[in-house]
Image: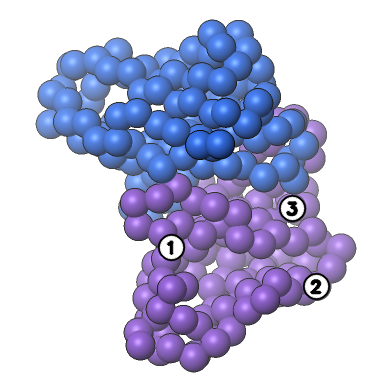
Chain colours: A blue, B purple
Amino acid sequence: NAGVTQTPKFRVLKTGQSMTLLCAQDMNHEYMYWYRQDPGMGLRLIHYSVGEGTTAKGEVPDGYNVSRLKKQNFLLGLESAAPSQTSVYFCASSTSVAYTDTQYFGPGTRLTVL
Amino acid sequence: QQQVKQSPQSLIVQKGGISIINCAYENTAFDYFPWYQQFPGKGPALLIAIRPDVSEKKEGRFTISFNKSAKQFSLHIMDSQPGDSATYFCAAAMGGGYNKLIFGAGTRLAVHP
C-alpha cells in the first residue's frame, strides 16, 4: 500500500514551458486535492476533485488546470509556466466529503521555473 | 487574506523542554482544528485534531489547548525530542461543502540535544 505518490519529485522549467504533475493514490479515496506550499504562506488549495470526472477550483487556481479521468489519478497541468509558480506542490486525498476526514499527503514535487 | 494566523514562525527548544505553537482564527464557523506535522522532504501528516466542544485534547506528549472565546488554539509538545524537529501547521475547517482545510503559515521547530 503506497498511499499517495507523486511524480516527478523535482523539475526545472523555463518560463513558458508546460508540464504535468501526476498524483496517484491506492486507497480508493473519492476526494483528491492539489496544494502549493510557499515559505511563510502555508499550504494553499489550487484545485480539488470530489470524484472521477469532476474538478473544482480552490483558492489559487489561476495558471493551472487539472483532470481526474481515473479515480486513482489526479493530474495538475501548467500550460505556460511562470516564475511565480515556483513552489512545492503537494497532492492529497481523503475518503469522503466529511470535513473532519483526514487528508493524506504525497511527498511533494519541487518545481522551479526560471 | 490569512484566515488562520500561526506563531512563531520558528522555534528552538532544548531537549526535554516544552514547545508551544499558537494559532488564532477569525471565522467562528470553523469547528474542526487539526495539526499537521511535516518532516523535511515529506508531505504533511495529521498529528492531532480537536473540535471546539472540548478545551483540551492530549495524545501522548502532544496536547491541543482550545480557547473558543478567544478564538485561539495551541499545540504543546511536552518533553520535546530531537525527533520532533519538523514544521508544524495548524489548520481549520468548517462543515458544509467540501473537505476544505485552511492552513496557518507553519512553524519550523528545532529541538536541540
Left or right: residue A1 versus residue B57 is left
When the figure is inspected, residue A63 is found, relative to residue B99, above or below; the finding is: above
Instruction: Say which amino acid is labelled 2.
Output: Ser
| Vertical placement of residue A68 versus B20, above or below | above
Residue B54 vertical position relative to residue B80 in the rendered view, above or below = above
Residue bearing mark 2: B55
* Dot 3 alpha-carbon crowd within 10 angstroms: few under 14, some 14 to 19, many 20 or more: some
Instruction: Residue under label 3, please give it.
Output: B32
Mark 2 belongs to chain = B
Secondary element under disc 2, as helix, strand or loop, is: loop
Q: Nearer the viewer, mark 2 or mark 1?
A: 1
Residue B105, position in %: x, y? Answer: 46, 56
Q: Which mark is residue B3?
A: none
Q: Position of residue A77 (x, y in %)?
A: 36, 17
| Residue furthest front in the image | A1
Give the residue displayed 33% in from the left and 18% down from the top: A20
Letter of the chain that mark 3 sits on in the rendering = B
Q: Give SS at disc 3.
A: loop
Q: Residue at x 56, y 36 (%)?
A: A1
Q: Amino acid at mark 3?
A: Tyr
Q: Which residue is mark 1?
A: B87
Q: Position of residue B7 (x, y in %)?
A: 48, 69
